[in-house]
Amino acid sequence: MNPKEAYVAHISCHLPEKRLTNEDLVREFKAWTTDKIKAKTGIEERRIAEKEPVSELATKAAERLFEETGLDRGEIDMVLLCTETPDYIMPSTACLVHRNLGLRKDCGAFDYNLGCSGYLYGLHMASAMVRSGMADKILLLTGDVLSRYVNPGDKSTRTIFGDGFTASLISSESQSGGIGNFVLGTDGTGCENLIIPAGGAVEPCDESTKEVYTNRYGNSRTKENLYMNGPEVFSFAVREVPPVVERCLELNDMTMEDVDLFVFHQATEMMLTKLRDVIKIPEDRFIIDIEETGNTVSSTIPMAIRRATKKGRLLPGDKVLICGFGVGYSWGATVIRF
């Protein structure tokens, strides 16, 4: 059997209705201003999922994909769901999405737990399945309700993260969106710099994990909340991302000049600007698209691709280098030929 090609045939998005604006935040954090938040993050508002679980929000992204493409959902062979905030410890949230969508019983479905590199790892798995002939059409879903794990008193994370969901159709049948070769990597020594310490088998939730503590910067959280060591994560990205981009170009037989658009994980504008400057990427070929949604973890890259297409920044025939990096530490990169 000759290997098939794998394509990103379509991307759809779903955002929760509630908006958390900088104006909302400065009413709570009196020492801050809207300009200060925007300058530090590049973000003006974020979307917040108040009550809906991941299964319902991911289902909405998938339903939108079916509406936009006209695809018969009976053609889906596999569902991959990237989330760090599943509905339950068990069963897999992907199984609940499978139920909600009414997919075939012989369609596989599973979760995988990754953060800001998650879209790259999902593309890697999905493209491998398509190329091997194991599947023809795969539904790749991303999304978290991370806002529920951010302490309201922790301005270091509350100003950055938002909730957002995407659905990508990875198919052997398309005229564009060809997926290239991948670079993937891991450095588990950085695991404690982006973590929710309590709630797993290592430290189950109890009264002690609910105790609120405040650091010297005035940020409050419990062990059940998201913790981010911002300076360490920033240093990790600046250290690891440039060689990852270089290696990705080598594996895809490309130079910097061959890439029409660079779409990185939308962490913060400050981090993106630093990476752009270090790698020496021209501004007109580099996407910064975080202002209206914040950092939506594994959804930032597909959301940025979708919006770049809608705005006319990504055109048919363009070669796009995507790179995700974050919690784990974990990272990945590839090229998509649209």
Image (cartoon, grey):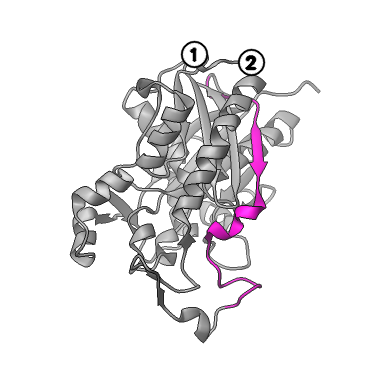
Residue to which mark 1 is pinned: 257
Q: Residue furthest bottom?
A: 207
Q: Is residue 72 visible?
A: no
Most foreground residue, 69 or 201 = 201
Q: Quadrant of residue 21?
A: bottom left
Q: Secondary structure at mark 1?
A: helix
Mark 2, other Cα within 10 Å: few <14 / some 14–19 / many ≥20: few
Q: Residue at x 62, y 41 (%)?
A: 121
Please indicate whether residue 283 sits to the left or right of residue 230 in the image: left
| Membership of 182 in magenta stretch | yes
Amino acid at circle 1: Glu
Type of amino acid at the residue the image marks with label 2: Asp
Report the disc number at residue 253.
2
Where is residue 239 drawn, in percent x and y?
Answer: 55, 38
- Tell me the distance, in whole angstroms, between the alpha carbons under discs 1 and 2: 12 Å
Q: Which residues are magenta?
A: 176-204
Q: Is residue 286 visible?
A: yes
Q: Secondary structure at mark 2?
A: loop
Question: Which of 18 and 209 lies nearest the eye of the viewer?
Answer: 209
Q: Looking at the picture, tell me which residue is in the foreground, 205 or 239.
A: 239
- The foreground one among 117 and 88 is 117
Position above or below: 298 against 49: above
The residue lying at 62 percent from left, 60 percent from top is: 92
